[in-house]
Image (cartoon, rainbow, N blue to C red):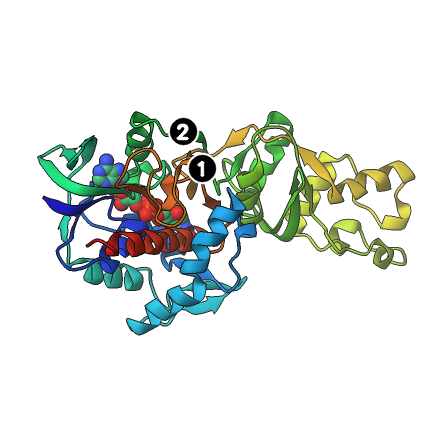
Amino acid sequence: MIPVVIIGGGASGLMLASLLPKKSAIVIESNPKVGAKLLVSGGGRCNVTNEVVSSDNYLGDKDFISSVLRQFDQNALLNWCDARGLGLISQKNHQYFCPNSAKEIVSILTKESSKQTVLLNEKVVSILSDKDGFLVQTNKQQIKSKSVVVASGGLSYPVLGASDIGYKLAQNVGHRISKLAPALVGFTLQKEQFFMKELSGSSVGNVEIKVGINSCKGDLLFAHKGISGPSVLNASLYWEKGSISIDFLPNFRWKSLSGSKKNISTLLPLPKRVMKALLEHLSIPDKPFVALSKEERDRLYELHNYTLAPAGTFGYSKAEVTKGGVSIDEIDVSSMMSKKIDSLYFIGEVLDVTGELGGYNLQWAFSSAFVCAKALNKYL
Ligand SMILES: Cc1cc2nc3c(=O)[nH]c(=O)nc-3n(C[C@H](O)[C@H](O)[C@H](O)COP(=O)(O)OP(=O)(O)OC[C@H]3O[C@@H](n4cnc5c(N)ncnc54)[C@H](O)[C@@H]3O)c2cc1C
């Protein structure tokens, strides 16, 4: 009987495998290779973590998240990478990326986890537990183990191997799954905003999107299917249904326009193509600010608070993560073990913890793997 079976050779599963003693675990991965999602993450350079990480960057139970992050924070992760010759580079909004390619971190994780048996092209279909341990059923064989760690991730990007197995296994032993939805994903539009689709390929820097009490700043991208870009992806974390509002011009000083005779489309700091489409949509003639009527100016100020109700999201095929998941109240924070079934553990995205854009989801995958490894190493 093998001590540990790890379901999933993604970020959390590989980190866990690398932290356990040699030959103590079998990693089962349905893909022909490990780390498929890592390879495409961060635009192919993998945004591994962030300079600033706290529970505020996550949806989920704040105390639980803080406790896990504290045990293996961004500095511990940076040191772990450093010790293996991978100096991550801080870029953009304090995000740490691989210097050249995501292959760099995947090859380290692959090497580190090769001290375990890694089964590829093998899919876990069910697990049974009894007093001696677990019987893990794959599409090829049955494997007996003392412990099982579910590191099977969420539902997003099914082309990269995502499956619902983690949620099913959890549900079968009585765990609650909080509502699942695609997140860090673009919004599709209602008819009224279809004009935005015509802007496909254009982007606006530094907008501010409000979803309820949450505010998401960053670029907005007009896409063929709707709207996307960092501000929208973060907004999707908080959106369920209903309206969002976009400030296309945060910090803009209208007074700067009052003396000018130039048309507003030339003066407002938005790409001309975007500006013209917004003016047309809001029925505002493109003329100097001083020449606008009070009503026209009022409509122009709507650019600070443009309200729309997304039709939906681009869905799991385009979502970076799945929000919701295995409920945290039924997981022991010191070990990531199920409070319902002894020796069954959950780590990574399968749990009801979802990070913002910026390296937070991988940090969570690695931190939760570390906590689990610490607990397992006590008896291995
Ligand atoms: C396009 C994209 C870009 C992203 N970019 C970033 C980024 O830059 N920074 C960041 O922090 N996060 C990013 N993320 C999110 C991040 O990749 C995930 O949150 C993270 O990989 C989750 O780790 P995990 O180990 O829980 O799951 P995963 O890494 O998804 O690993 C789960 C593994 O389990 C396997 N599996 C599933 N079902 C079975 C089964 N039945 N049997 C065997 N194996 C199975 C899957 O094939 C997969 O390899 C991105 C996601 C996507 C899709």
Asked where in the image residue 159 lies, by quadrant, the reply is top left
> For numbered disc 2, what is the local secondary structure?
loop
* Residue 285 is at least partly visible in this image: no
**Residue nearest the observer in this picture, 65 or 228:** 65
Residue at image mark 1:
329
Q: Residues within 10 Å of mark 2 (few under 14, many from 20)?
A: some
Ligand 1 under 8 Å from disc 2 Cβ: no
Q: Is residue 3 left or right of residue 54?
A: left
Is residue 363 in sight in this rendering? yes
Residue 62, above or below 322? below
Q: Is residue 325 left or right of residue 114?
A: right
**Label 1 sits on what residue type?**
Asp
Q: Is residue 231 above or below residue 307?
A: below
Question: Count of labels shown?
Answer: 2
User: Alpha-carbon distance for marks 2 and 1?
Assistant: 9 Å
Residue at position x 29%, y 26% in the image: 172
Q: Position of residue 285 (x, y in %)?
A: 80, 40
Which residue is the site of mark 2? Answer: 176
Q: Is residue 233 above or below residue 74?
A: above
Any mark on residue 186, and which?
none
Label 1 residue SS:
helix
